[in-house]
Image (tube, rainbow, N blue to C red):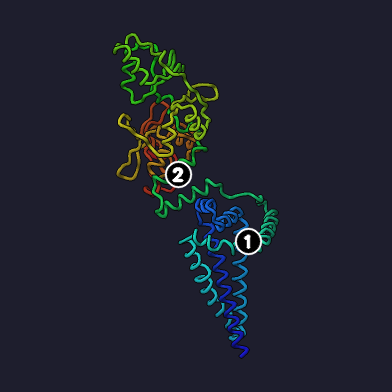
Amino acid sequence: MDTEIDLWFAASIVVISLLLSAFFAGAETAFTAASRARMHTLEQAGDPRAAIVNRILAIRERFIGAMLIGYNIVAIGASAFTTSVLTALFGKSGVIYATVGMSVLVIVFAEVLPKTLAISKPDQTALATARPVAFAVAVMGPLAIAIEQLVRLMLKPFGVTIGEHQSILTASEELRGQVALMHREGGVAKAERDMLGGLLDLSELNVSDVMVHRTKMRAIDADQASEDIVRAVLSSPYTRMPLWRGTPENIIGVLHAKDLLRALDAAGGDASGLKVEALALETWFVPGTTSLRAQLKAFLTKKTHFALVVDEYGEVMGLVTLEDILEEIVGEIADEHDVTVSGVRPQGDGSVNVDGGVPIRDLNRAMDWNLPDEEATTIAGLVIHEARTIPDQGNAFNFHGFRFQVIRKAKNRITTLRITPLTATGVQVTGQIEGPRGAV
């Protein structure tokens, strides 16, 4: 009779332990996956459970520590108790029975099952378990803090210093990782992933990274005849044109096509008497180190769409528009007057012919690549940076998992490159430089 009671008692302890383990595992998954925005909305609507969830998520490290401690204490205790009972019944063979049996029970009923249920409905599960989780955190939170301090002390002799409020990932990096994961799993389309990534990158990019370089700027000589200026504006796909006098770097104003057409209409269509310089708007100069986020706010505040970019010496580097910044978020914006020159031409053999002036970010978006853009803005600049020289036509380089071959070169400018993923060619060498007829 006593043995039967002991068995029932042991079975009860194991069941209770498994239920507690399932609670800790499911709660951790649910709170981690719960929507912060929905919880905030529910709290504003007066739901006390949502308020508890938000308070717990505000101390996420302590919450996760308490859940892990509770789960491990219960799981280890159940395993040890089961082992002692089965050893008493079956002798040494009881250890094997306990190990196999508890492994199956813990994995299925205390891990996979509760976490699957929690991840399928994280918000509902978090709300349902809010109060018991808060109690568990209050009880085991101090123990979690003590263990964290012990871990810090143990890591300190090895040179690993972890601050009390140090986060491994910033909020933007966590969001970026979540978006990338959802894209791989099919929940987010590539265009949406690129859009969210572009929005997060606004504070990390400068206007010099997206500007139209001065060598590609379309500007008008203010000393030309007014008839020639009107023809130049009408033939341009742009509505705003910089005016220069003497040298192209001496910008004296920005001519808006609408202002020119209004003046031309007022003059009865006679362009000979127009004073074009008087129609020009004041030039707005911005430093090339301005972040895109700051420049976007400045555009909205100043209610203009056009600025010239200057370097630290005040020399004109190029121009930036509101459209250039928006394209970093939504991708290429084209209208019926745009001259579409992508500069990216995929080939049948898996390679891609790319114009040297194509921005690395645009190429990454178009081809879904991940070439670095920290040291250079254009693809030609990346090749020059990695090669540490201005390569000749026919030179080839292998780096970052791609083969770069210079197809055309004009003076000191790389105009066309052929880029081939090394996986497509089977080449695995990096840092190799080849000449037009082989390795040099």
41 to the left or right of 241:
right
Residue 54, compared with residue 285, is above or below; it is below
330 to the left or right of 52:
left
Q: Residue 113: give x, y in percent of width and height.
A: 48, 68
Quadrant position of residue 237: top left
Quadrant position of residue 79: bottom right
Q: Which mark is residue 163?
A: none
Q: Which quadrant is home to the N terminus?
A: bottom right
Q: Residue 418: give x, y in percent of width and height.
A: 36, 38
Residue placed furthest toward the top: 273
Residue lying at 63% horizontally and 89% vertically, measured from the top left: 2
Spatial CA distance of label 2 from label 1 is 35 Å
Residue 144, compared with residue 85, is above or below; it is above
Amino acid type indicated by mark 1? Val
Q: Residue 70: give x, y in percent of width and height.
A: 61, 66
Q: Residue 320: give x, y in percent of width and height.
A: 45, 28
Does residue 399 show up? no
Does residue 414 show up? yes
Residue 366, compared with residue 124, is above or below; it is above
Q: Element under label 1?
A: helix
Q: Which residue is mark 2?
A: 196
**Which is more N-terminal, label 1 or label 2?**
1
5 to the left or right of 296:
right
Residue lying at 38% horizontally and 27% vertically, measured from the top left: 410
Q: Which quadrant is home to the C terminus?
A: top left
In the image, 327 versus 270, the foreground residue is: 270
Closest to the camera, between mark 2 and mark 1, is 1
In the image, 344 versus 352, the foreground residue is: 344
Q: Element under label 2?
A: helix
Residue 417, compared with residue 223, is above or below; it is below
Q: Which residue is mark 1?
A: 137
Q: Are marks 2 and 1 in contact (CB under 8 Å)?
A: no
